[in-house]
Amino acid sequence: MPLIKVRGVEHYYEWIRSSEAGKTKPVMIFLHGWAGSGRYWESTCFALADEFDCLLYDMRGFGRSRLPLGETPTLKYQMEEYADDLAALLDIFEIDRVYLNAHSMGASVATLFLNRYPERVERAILTCSGIFEYDEKAFAAFHKFGGYVVKFRPPWLSKIPFADKLFMKRFLHRPLPTAISKAFLEDFIIADYEAALGTIFTSVSKEASEVMPQEFAKLSVPTLLVSGEHDIIIPAEMGRQAAALSEKVEYVVIPDTAHFPMLEDAETYLEKVREFLGIKREAVV
């Protein structure tokens, strides 16, 4: 399993490239959402591998990027910290400039990265991202519920028939293959407790509701923001409001999808991404 130490933590990473030898391609790096891992981006990477060298990795405390046992992490769980993790990862690989493709919580990290390191990004795609208003009672209830969810994650949960389908139901408008749903549930179960809980409090907070509109307004890198029409996690209207804050942001809604449009309707998602990136596909005769 390929691991690389980033700011004191071993991170899992994976390169997905086409087999075409000798061709120099730009790098596209993928960021996953809360309690997930880079593996749900794999099909998108394979679809774009003719145009990009695709680098996916599991963010600190999630997926296969395990936190050290028996040690108190010195790094915190603010989205800004994860943006700095990404910068450090690119430094290690000696990559100066990339394309970014990020989802959900990862898209919040990417937005901060775009403003901290605009010179390092050619173009960005933010999938299922947006801005929200602070509601003290709603946020308190969400954090309380989130604490219960993170605490109750027994390993045997993934062995229960159809548990993966029930787990993914609120995220989807179209069902996914069982293998993909099971992978999501497994990633959720193994996510580090402190990282999972910490990022709930930092990504959905009063501070985030104040900071993220400012971050979207400051964007200077050409960006595509993609929403799923039926997303109840980050509703499309939140994405629309975020996109309206900057002339650098193009906005698109993919019909009949929810929180994972790149998996629920991969064909349309890839069409919109390629169009934004100016990639022309040869017609199949």
Image (cartoon, rainbow, N blue to C red):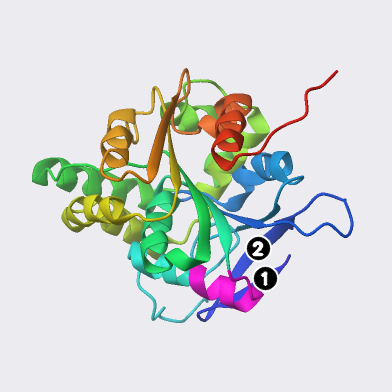
Residue 13's label in the rendered image is 2
- Residue at 46% across / 19% down in the picture? 255
Q: In the rendered structure, which amino acid carries the disc numbered 2?
A: Tyr
Residues shaded magenta: 86-96
| In this rendering, position of residue 282 left or right of residue 69 | right
Q: Are marks 1 and 2 in contact (CB under 8 Å)?
A: yes
Q: Position of residue 235 (x, y in %)?
A: 32, 31
Magenta segment, prevailing SS (helix, strand or loop) = helix
Please rate how many residues cluster around mark 1, counting C-alpha atoms within 10 Å: few if below 14, some from 14 to 19, many from 20.
some
Q: Secondary structure at mark 2?
A: strand
| Residue located beneath label 1 in the image | 3
Q: Position of residue 16 (x, y in %)?
A: 74, 53
Spatial CA distance of label 1 from label 2 is 6 Å
* Number of marks: 2
Q: Is residue 55 above or below residue 213?
A: below
Give the image quarter of residue 109. bottom left
Is residue 87 located in the magenta-colored stretch of the structure? yes
Please rate how many residues cluster around mark 2, counting C-alpha atoms within 10 Å: few if below 14, some from 14 to 19, many from 20.
some
- Residue at 57% across / 37% down in the picture? 273
Q: Secondary structure at mark 1?
A: strand
Q: Position of residue 78 (x, y in %)?
A: 32, 65
- Give whichever of discs 1 and 2 has the lower sequence position: 1
Q: Is residue 22 above or below residue 161?
A: below
Question: Can the viewer see residue 205 in this picture?
Answer: yes
Q: Position of residue 52 (x, y in %)?
A: 70, 51
Q: Quadrant of the C terminus?
A: top right
Q: Quadrant of the N terminus?
A: bottom right
Asked whether 135 or 29 is in front, the reply is 29
Asked whether 37 or 133 is in front, the reply is 133
